[in-house]
Image: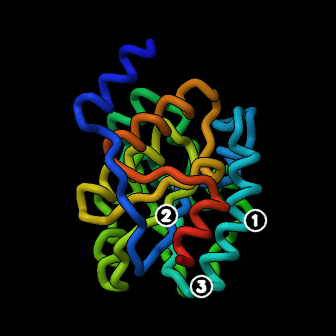
C-alpha cells in the first residue's frame, strides 16, 4: 500500500497550488435528504454541515460570491436520466419536497445563486461557471455532500473550467468514511488543494 502511494510523488502528482484571490464558495447538496441517515445521509455529513455554517458565515463576512446546489427532478420525472437508473431514489427529490430543500442553517441569502441539477456536478448543464466567472472568482472553496460523488464531480468540473478548487476537508462529508478519505486523497493529488476549514480561512486571509 505504501509503495502504491509513493508512486504519486514519484510520478509528480500532488503539486502545491496556492489559493489565489478572488475567492468564491460552493456548497454542494447540503439538503435535508443528505442530512438524514434514513434517506441519503449518514457517515460524517452532520459534522460537515455544522462546520460549513462557520465557513458560510466567513464567506458572507468577506463578501465572497456564494453558490448552493440542489438535486431537483421534475414532478412528472420527465428529466429522469442515467443517474436515476443507478440511484432511483433520487427521483424523489422534487422542487417542493422537504428532502430536496437546503438545510435551514445554510439557507441561501439574497444574492446567492441556487443551482438546480439532475446529475452529480453542480456545473454540468447549469449557469454556475458563467456566474462565478462574471464575479471574477479564481479560487473556489467547496463544501458539501457527498465527498465521493457530487463534491468530487463538481471539483473536477471546477478545475476543468479553470477555477482553483479548494476542498474544505471538514466541510465535506460522505455516508461512509472510506470513500470520503480516499476521494480527499485523490482530489489532493490531481485536482485541488485540500485544507481544513481553519486552514482555509487563514490561507484566504493571507
Q: Position of residue 179 (x, y in %)?
A: 53, 28
Residue receiving disc 1: 104
Question: What element does badge 3 sit on?
Answer: helix
> At 39% across and 22% down in the image, what residue appears?
5
Q: Position of residue 117 (x, y in %)?
A: 42, 56
> At 29% across and 75% down in the image, what residue appears?
130
- In the image, taking residue 163 as reference, residue 21 lies left or right, namely right
Earlier in the chain: of badge 2 and badge 3, it is: 3
> At 44% across and 12% down in the image, what residue appears?
1
> At 39% across and 51% down in the image, what residue appears?
192
Residue receiving disc 3: 62
Q: With respect to residue 145, does 61 lie above or below?
A: below
Q: Quadrant of residue 100?
A: bottom right
Q: Position of residue 111 (x, y in %)?
A: 54, 86
Question: What element does badge 1 sit on?
Answer: helix
Of residues 125 and 161, the one drawn nearer to the viewer in this rendering: 161
Residue 141, numbered circle: 2
- Residue 136 seen from this side: yes
Residue 96, numbered circle: none
Earlier in the chain: of badge 1 and badge 3, it is: 3
Q: With respect to residue 38, does 26 lie above or below?
A: below
Alpha-carbon span between mark 1 and mark 3: 21 Å
- Pointer 2 local density, CA inside 10 Å: few below 14, some 14–19, many at least 20: many
- In the image, taking residue 103 as reference, residue 14 lies left or right, namely left
Name the mark nearer the viewer: 2 or 1. 2
Q: Quadrant of residue 123?
A: bottom left
Alpha-carbon span between mark 2 and mark 1: 21 Å
Amino acid at each position: 500500500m505504501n509503495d502504491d502511494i509513493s508512486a504519486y510523488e514519484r510520478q509528480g502528482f500532488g503539486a502545491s497550488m496556492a489559493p489565489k484571490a478572488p475567492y468564491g464558495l460552493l456548497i454542494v447538496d447540503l439538503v435535508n435528504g443528505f442530512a438524514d441517515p434514513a434517506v441519503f445521509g449518514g457517515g460524517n455529513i452532520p459534522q460537515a454541515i455544522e462546520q460549513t455554517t462557520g465557513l458560510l458565515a466567513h464567506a458572507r463576512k468577506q463578501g465572497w460570491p456564494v453558490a448552493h446546489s440542489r438535486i431537483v427532478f421534475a414532478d412528472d420525472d420527465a428529466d429522469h436520466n442515467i443517474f436515476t437508473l443507478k440511484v432511483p431514489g433520487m427521483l424523489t427529490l422534487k422542487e417542493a419536497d422537504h428532502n430536496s430543500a437546503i438545510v435551514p442553517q445554510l439557507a441561501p441569502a439574497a444574492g446567492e445563486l441556487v443551482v438546480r441539477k439532475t446529475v452529480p456536478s453542480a456545473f454540468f448543464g447549469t449557469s454556475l461557471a458563467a456566474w462565478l466567472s462574471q464575479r471574477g472568482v479564481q479560487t473556489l472553496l467547496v463544501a458539501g455532500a457527498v465527498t465521493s460523488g457530487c463534491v468530487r464531480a463538481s471539483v473536477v468540473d471546477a478545475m476543468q473550467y479553470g477555477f482553483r478548487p479548494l476542498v474544505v476537508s471538514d466541510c465535506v462529508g460522505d455516508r461512509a468514511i472510506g470513500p470520503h478519505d480516499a476521494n480527499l486523497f485523490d482530489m489532493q493529488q490531481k485536482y485541488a488543494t485540500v485544507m481544513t476549514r481553519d486552514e482555509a480561512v487563514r490561507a484566504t486571509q493571507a
